[in-house]
Image (cartoon, helix red, strand yellow):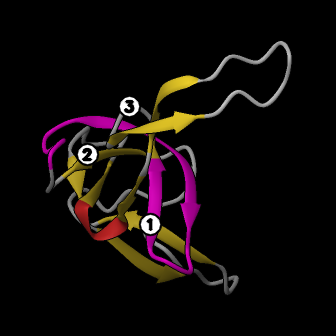
């Protein structure tokens, strides 16, 4: 089970966008990467493909390594490490290691 899921608020711990926060748009579990809104912009040169579509230089988010992200807990409102726990009904949940609240 991954520590980061879609729609989580995360803070960037390392890289060119260190310290910024954003919402996770998509997670790629096979490559341990995620796309975060407003983080890790790259330049893509787009060719015009249709009559109405316009080509040019596009700025878009690229994926970032999950190890460089920390989930922001809603309870204590700070970036935290995520723990895994199995409940009595045998379901796995993620919890905040600081305040022990289920994410």
In front: mark 2 or mark 1?
1
Q: Which residue is mark 3?
A: 38
Ranked by sequence position, the earlier of labels 1 and 3 is 1
Crowding at mark 3 (Cα within 10 Å: few <14, some 14-19, many 20+): some
Secondary structure found at label 3? loop
What segment carries the magenta color?
A: 16-35
In the rendered image, which residue does mark 1 sit on? 33
Q: Earlier in the sequence, mark 2 or mark 1?
A: 2
Residue indicated by mark 2: 11
Q: Position of residue 50 (x, y in %)?
A: 84, 24
**Residue found at x 46% / y 81%:** 85
Quarter of image, res 28: bottom right
Above or below: residue 93 compared with residue 5: below
Labels 2 & 1 near each other (Cβ < 8 A): no
Asked whether residue 96 appears in the rendered view, the answer is yes
Question: Which quarter of the picture shows residue 38?
Answer: top left
Q: Residue at x 26, y 38 (%)?
A: 77
Residue 86 drawn at (x, y percent) = 54, 84
């Amino acid at each position: 089970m991954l520590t980061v899921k879609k729609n989580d608020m995360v803070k960037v711990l390392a890289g060119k966008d260190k310290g910024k926060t954003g919402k996770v748009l998509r997670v790629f579990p096979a490559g341990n990467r995620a796309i975060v809104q407003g983080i890790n912009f790259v330049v893509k040169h787009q060719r015009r493909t249709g009559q109405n579509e316009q080509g040019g230089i596009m700025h878009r988010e690229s994926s970032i390594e999950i190890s460089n992200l920390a989930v922001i807990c809603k309870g204590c409102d700070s970036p935290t490490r995520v723990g895994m726990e199995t409940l009595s009904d045998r379901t796995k949940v993620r919890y905040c290691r600081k305040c022990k609240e289920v994410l």
